[in-house]
Amino acid sequence: MLVEALLDGTPEMDLASLPHRVCEVCVQRLSLSAASIALIGGPQTREPLASAGRLAGQVEELQFAAGEGPSVEAFTNGVPALEPDLAGNGLAGWPGFARTALSLGVRAVFAVPLQVGWARVGALDMTRDC
């Protein structure tokens, strides 16, 4: 079902548009406010690849400027970083990121590391406003 949603009935979809489509499907099917994918090479090296939804690029940029947040944590630790209540545990875990994100209206954040084999290459970041 997810593959069908990604392809949207178009099996000829080119590989270059797949990251953007993944973000769109995440926002639509998971009732999210935003989703973004960034390739990450280290703490100071990242390349935004795709985004969809309200504030997607801004939340991604905020995490790397602050040096903390769900994408940074998911990439660094290799496990999902899930915070359904940013005003609660998020303030304790990522104080710089959480304060600014909350002021923008973000209420929940979720990130999963992206890997190719054993190599971590980035993160999928997702947010919810309510």
Image (cartoon, helix red, strand yellow):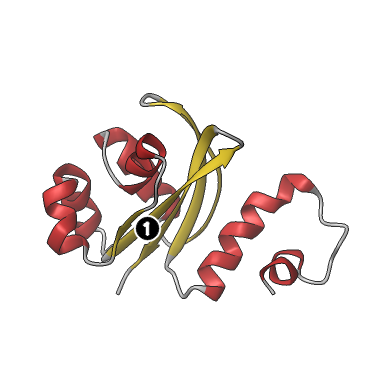
Residue tagged 1? 110
The x, y position of residue 87, in whole percent, is 15, 62
- Tally of numbered discs: 1
**Residue 129: which quarter of the image?**
bottom left
Residue at (81, 50) in percent of width and height: 14
Of residue 41 and residue 50, the one placed in the foreground of this image is 41
Furthest-right residue in this view: 12
Report the amino acid beneath label 1: Phe
Judge from the rendering whether residue 23 lies leftward or rightward of residue 113; answer left or right.
right
The x, y position of residue 35, in whole percent, is 48, 58
Residue at (25, 54) in percent of width and height: 101
Furthest-front residue in this view: 118
Other residues around mark 1 within 10 Å, as few (<14) / some (14–19) / many (≥20): some
Residue at (25, 36) in percent of width and height: 66
Judge from the rendering whether residue 11 lies leftward or rightward of residue 116; answer left or right.
right
Judge from the rendering whether residue 114 lies leftward or rightward of residue 116; answer left or right.
left
Q: Quadrant of the C terminus?
A: bottom left
Q: Quadrant of the N terminus?
A: bottom right
The x, y position of residue 95, in whole percent, is 14, 46
Judge from the rendering whether residue 69 lies leftward or rightward of residue 46; answer left or right.
left
Secondary structure under the numbered disc 1 in the rendered image: strand
